[in-house]
């Protein structure tokens, strides 16, 4: 909440392990005399699942993910945004909210999908899998009435554009979700450019009761932060980039050792033993 009020744009990156958390916190760059770093961590259902070799369909349960967040928090200080998928069963939602708030998580994102969860970036989506405005609003209200502090933010994630529905559908939902108590709106898209997101943002920001907008530019990754800001976006989430960057690096080492029948040739490309043992203070 403090970052939303104080930053030009809030920059969030996926964190799938305590070690990743340490790396995020320790990475800062200087560019043209300005310092840049990530402001917050994204606890992604996709990367939490992939890390365990499971599909992103809630096979990995909330308890497992919460334990992991607790371990991340042991070694980090930045705020965490929790990807709560669709929040699960409405009867169970209050307990999830209590656990997250007690852990010190800063926000929960819940998406307006129903049924078996399927990752939003899959090409084929079932248009009937979106929750009704009425039912999803109930979930938002439950989160709102359960939380103890209004510093714990409720983010409503709209899947209309992912499902091929109109901007009007997304707008109607945004207004209803704000009315029900959402503190921010995550508008998702899987287009390869940000046009539909910018169209939505332009209209939503004119709305009297508009709230900060969050985007996840995984498929339209050419867009720069300055352009997002200019178009009325407040928070950008790089949702899966650390897990994705580790995969080819590890695959390369695997192949090199097989190829060379020794590890010497890979040494220069990987972190030294000295560094890794001294990393954890
Ligand atoms: C995630 O990172 O798990 C997300 C974003 O929910 S997406 O994969 O685009 O659905
Ligand atoms: Mg997810």
Image (cartoon, helix red, strand yellow):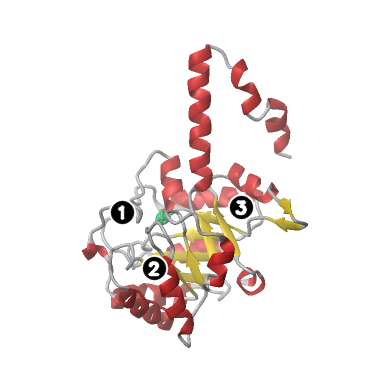
Q: Nearer the viewer, residue 215 or 184?
A: 215
Q: Nearer the viewer, residue 212 or 8?
A: 8
Q: Are marks 3 and 1 in contact (CB under 8 Å)?
A: no
Please name the residue that numbered disc 3 is placed on.
73
Between label 3 and label 1, give the one nearer the viewer: 1
Residue 77 falls in which quadrant of the image? Answer: bottom right
For the point 33% across and 51% down, the residue is 57
Can residue 104 be seen in this snapshot?
no
Label 3 to label 1: alpha-carbon separation: 28 Å
- Dot 1, crowdedness within 10 Å: few (<14), some or many (≥20)? some
Quadrant where the N terminus is found in the figure: bottom right
Dot 2 falls on a residue whose secondary structure is: helix
First reached walking from the N terminus: tag 3 or tag 2:
3
Please name the residue that numbered disc 1 is placed on.
118
For the point 42% across and 60% down, the residue is 193
Between label 2 and label 1, give the one nearer the viewer: 2
Q: Nearer the viewer, residue 109 or 197?
A: 197
């Amino acid at each position: 909440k403090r970052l939303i009020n104080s930053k030009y744009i809030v920059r969030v990156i996926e964190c799938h392990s305590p070690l990743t958390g340490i790396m995020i916190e320790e990475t800062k760059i200087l560019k043209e005399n300005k310092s840049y770093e990530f402001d917050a961590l994204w606890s992604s259902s996709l990367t939490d699942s992939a890390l365990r070799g499971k599909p992103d369909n809630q096979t990995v349960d909330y308890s497992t993910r919460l334990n992991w967040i607790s371990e991340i928090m042991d070694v980090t200080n930045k705020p965490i945004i929790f990807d709560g998928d669709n929040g699960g069963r409405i009867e169970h939602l209050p307990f999830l909210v209590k656990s997250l708030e007690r852990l010190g998580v800063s926000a929960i994102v819940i998406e307006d999908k129903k049924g078996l969860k399927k990752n939003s970036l899959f090409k084929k989506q079932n248009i009937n899998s979106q929750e009704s405005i009425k039912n999803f609003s109930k979930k938002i209200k439950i989160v709102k009435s359960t939380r103890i502090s209004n510093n714990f933010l409720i983010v409503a994630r709209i899947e209309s554009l992912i499902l091929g529905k109109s901007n009007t559908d997304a707008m109607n939902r945004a207004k209803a979700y704000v009315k029900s108590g959402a503190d921010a709106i995550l508008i998702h898209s899987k287009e390869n450019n940000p046009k539909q997101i910018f169209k939505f943002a332009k209209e939503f920001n004119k709305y009297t009761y508009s709230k900060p907008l969050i985007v996840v530019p995984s498929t339209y990754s050419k867009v720069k932060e300055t352009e997002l800001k200019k178009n009325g976006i407040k928070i950008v989430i790089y949702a899966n980039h650390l897990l994705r960057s580790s995969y080819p690096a590890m695959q390369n080492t695997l192949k090199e050792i097989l190829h060379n029948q020794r590890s010497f040739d890979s040494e220069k490309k990987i972190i030294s033993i000295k560094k890794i043992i001294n990393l954890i203070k």
